[in-house]
Amino acid sequence: MQTEGYDSSAGLSVIVNNGTIYVAGEQYDLSTYYPFIWSGTSVTSLAEAQLPIPNAYSSGGNEDGDGHAHNVQVYNGQIYVAGYYKVDDGNGSYYYRAALWIDSSNPDLYAPDDDNNLAAFSVYIYNGDIYVAGNIEKPKNESEVYVQPCYWKNGVRFELDAPEYGNNAKDYYNIGAHAIVVQ
């Protein structure tokens, strides 16, 4: 699965549709992760999709940033890939944005004006509706954040309740929705 010029590769999700094997994953070159989709024996870089804010895969002053492809689905002949990418805020910091690539085109952006980190891990299409599972960072107090599980239905985010403990404070860390199935 690894293509020339990369140091490591990972397939993170697989689906078979009409006899074709699709794998969502990433490749790494010792400094940057790049999202990819393998279809049969061909490979397509999702990093080639240009991102409208603020620039394509920008990361902390580097030429490249990180992109991750975590899940793949095929619906009505189109390939859907859920993941996330790193965006430079232009001030030397970065944040993550959840992404949904459709046929390796420009990814749909979730909450592009939101200051919080977001990630997408799973996509599922049911009756023409697109569901994406993931998480969003929320402020716990002035200096800490917690990670809230959520899902998107057709681009609209719904936050999920998560366990609270310790004087009803949000004391958990890194709880995210990593899979979604609709019946």
Image (cartoon, rainbow, N blue to C red):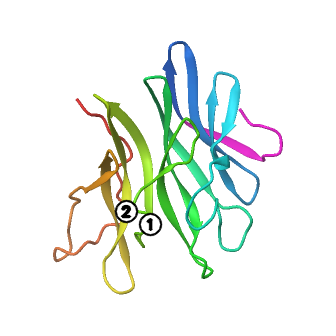
Query: For the point 48% across and 60% down, which residue is it?
Result: 97
- 3 magenta-colored: yes
Q: Position of residue 154 (x, y in %)?
A: 32, 44
Q: Position of residue 101 (x, y in %)?
A: 52, 43
Relative to 54, residue 33 above or below: above
Q: Are marks 2 and 1 in contact (CB under 8 Å)?
A: yes
Relative to 124, residue 149 above or below: below
Query: For the point 67% across and 47% down, which residue is it?
Result: 48
Q: Nearer the viewer, residue 73 or 169?
A: 73
**In the image, farthest residue toward the right:** 5
Residue 117 got which mark? 1
- Helix, strand or loop at label 2? It is strand
Tell me if 32 is positioned left or right of 101 in this view.
Answer: right
- Helix, strand or loop at label 1? It is loop
Q: Which residue type carries mark 2?
A: Ile
- 39 magenta-colored: no
**Where is the C terminus found, in terms of image quarters?**
top left
Q: Position of residue 132 (x, y in %)?
A: 37, 44
Residue that badge 2 annotates: 136
Q: Which residue type carries mark 1?
A: Asn
Q: Position of residue 18 (x, y in %)?
A: 50, 13
Q: Which residues are magenta?
A: 1-12
